[in-house]
């Protein structure tokens, strides 16, 4: 909290009043001049301060030719400023000012950012959120929502602060390092998430709404809620899955959303580890597609009158006895692909292997050869 000696006209700024932006190799802190002048105005309006001269005068931001020029704060009436002594530097941000000219010198280094062309466009701050993303690092980040929190050099360490920044700036993209366990009420609708890999970034769900969300290169577990898109992600134990997975791997069992009647697609996906993952269809009624599947997988609870198409590049497809309805088309696209069919009597299984496909094409070619004319024109023209 600021302290004003009204008689001596000295404004004391505690170190804790400033915001830490760097701790090593030297300590650097930041003073937002706009917040500073508002706190001074509150002190001037107090019962004690209202009888003394004003500490400063303020010219607000002004827009000229589409460019917003920054506010100006001028300390007046002989007031000086003393920062709590120590071996650190303070960056003055948010306005042009004469603060550096009225500082009582000690070990603190004051860095003024005054500029005749200083501007304060919201777009400038937004550009600091590279890729229009809010950066979260639960390992080395820090709490807070005041700019530059959420930018790459100053990531936040929790989703609540990141979400507050999202609402403030209308950003819907997140960049994550570390792990987040979502809480009741967290909303991920229309958001987009990026991780460096599914080893370094993971999300744990418990029914949070995630319609139209997209996830890239992350580890995901828990109960989903809504249709979403997943790219290069790893699924642990997941329930109520709906949407599209591209280039993903199954490191645990995945259960589809029984209430979802739309198509589900797993494209270029694989199982992770030596044990086959289970794709539990959970009686869902939408079509299910596994395109270019690699590895082992067990299909269970395919029990509605719908259709599943599996293109297996290599690995083993096992149809569980709980598959009791619908049509499952299995295309074995390599000699290393195999099928274990334990499906129930009500499930129709159609198998097409690469061998039968080639043979069919050969038969077609043979039939066309047979229709060629037997005689050849050999007369001289």
Image: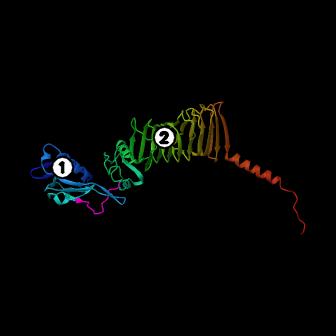
Callout 1: 10 Å neighbours few (<14), some, many (20+)? Answer: some
Tell me: 190 left or right of 379. left
Task: Tell me where the magenta segment starts and ends, as one range.
Answer: 111-121
Query: Helix or strand or loop: what does disc 1 sit on?
Result: loop
Any part of residue 291 in sight: yes
Q: Is residue 248 magenta?
A: no
Q: Residue at x 23, y 54 (%)?
A: 58
- Location of residue 236 with respect to 80 vertically, above or below: above
Tell me: 309 left or right of 188. right
Q: Is residue 113 magenta?
A: yes
297 or 139: nearer the viewer: 139
Residue 166, numbered label: none
320 or 239: nearer the viewer: 239
Residue 211, numbered label: 2
Among numbered discs 2 and 1, the one appearing first in the sequence? 1
Q: Position of residue 277 (x, y in %)?
A: 53, 39
322 or 162: nearer the viewer: 162
Any part of residue 295 in sight: no
What's the distance in space between the residues labelled 2 and 1, CA to CA? 47 Å
Residue 14, numbered label: 1
């Amino acid at each position: 909290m600021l302290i004003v000696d009204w008689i001596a006209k000295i404004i004391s700024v505690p170190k804790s009043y400033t915001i830490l932006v760097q701790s090593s190799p030297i300590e650097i802190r930041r003073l937002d001049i706009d917040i500073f002048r508002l706190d001074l105005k509150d002190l001037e309006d107090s019962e004690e301060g209202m009888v003394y001269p004003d500490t400063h005068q303020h010219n607000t931001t002004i827009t000229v030719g589409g460019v917003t020029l920054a506010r100006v704060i001028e300390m007046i009436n002989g007031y000086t400023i003393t920062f709590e002594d120590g071996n650190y530097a303070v960056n003055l941000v948010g306005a042009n000012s004469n603060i550096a000219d009225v500082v009582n010198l000690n070990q603190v280094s004051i860095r003024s950012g005054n500029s005749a062309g200083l501007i304060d466009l919201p777009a400038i701050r937004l550009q600091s959120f590279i890729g229009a993303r809010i950066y979260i690092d639960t390992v080395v980040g820090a709490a807070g929502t005041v700019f530059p929190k959420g930018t790459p050099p100053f990531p936040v360490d929790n989703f609540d602060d990141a979400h507050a920044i999202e609402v403030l700036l209308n950003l819907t993209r997140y960049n994550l390092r570390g792990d987040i366990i979502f809480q009741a009420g967290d909303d991920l609708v229309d958001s987009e998430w990026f991780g460096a890999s599914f080893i370094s970034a993971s999300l744990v769900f418990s029914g949070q709404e995630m319609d139209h969300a997209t996830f890239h290169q992350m580890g995901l577990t828990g109960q989903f809620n809504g249709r979403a898109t997943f790219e290069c992600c790893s699924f642990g134990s997941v329930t109520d899955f709906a949407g599209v997975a591209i280039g993903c791997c199954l490191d645990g069992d995945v259960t589809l959303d029984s209430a979802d009647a739309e198509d589900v697609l797993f494209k270029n996906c694989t199982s992770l580890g030596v044990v086959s993952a289970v794709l539990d269809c959970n009686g869902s009624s939408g079509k299910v597609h596994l395109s270019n599947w690699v590895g082992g997988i067990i299909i269970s609870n395919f029990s509605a009158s719908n259709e599943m198409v599996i293109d297996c590049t290599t690995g083993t497809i096992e149809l569980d006895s709980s598959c009791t309805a619908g049509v499952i088309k299995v295309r074995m696209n390599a000699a290393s692909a195999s099928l274990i069919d334990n499906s129930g009597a009500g499930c129709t299984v159609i198998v097409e292997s690469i061998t039968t496909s080639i043979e069919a094409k050969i038969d077609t070619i043979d039939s066309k050869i047979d229709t060629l004319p037997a005689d050849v024109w050999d007369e001289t023209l």
